[in-house]
Amino acid sequence: MTTLAMGAGMLPIAMGVGIADASFRSPMAIAVIGGLITSTVLSLLVVPAVFTYMDDFEGLVRRVRAKLRRHPKGSAVEEKA
């Protein structure tokens, strides 16, 4: 809600509506709106996705380590085969 309110507040400035010197303030408003959109996308989509991938990778590493502990190199199981 805060991001939406901030973006809506900056929109008239970015479009240059009702401002005497819009060429001075418009680029900053566009940058602020772009930053709000970027941070929202990162915090709602990218960070949870990366966390999920890292959690899955941790599970894979744990399974591989457990398998290696059960059958270390040079054990009797490998010598019989």
Image: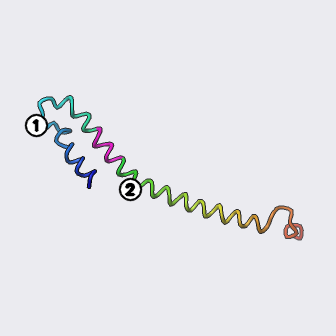
**Disc 1 target residue:** 18
Residue that sits furthest to the front in the current view: 2
Give me the residue at 20% from left, 43% from top. Answer: 11
Give me the residue at 25% from left, 52% from top. Answer: 4
Residue 35 lies, in percent from the top left, at: 33, 43
Element carrying mark 2: helix
- Residue 33 magenta-highlighted: yes
| Nearer-N-terminus badge (2/1) | 1
Q: CA distance from mark 2 to mark 1?
A: 33 Å
Q: Amino acid at mark 2?
A: Leu
Q: Is residue 22 above or below residue 58?
A: above
Q: Total label count? A: 2
**Disc 2 target residue:** 44
Q: Is residue 71 left or right of residue 7?
A: right
Q: Is residue 23 above or below residue 70?
A: above
Element carrying mark 1: loop
Residue 74 lies, in percent from the top left, at: 86, 62
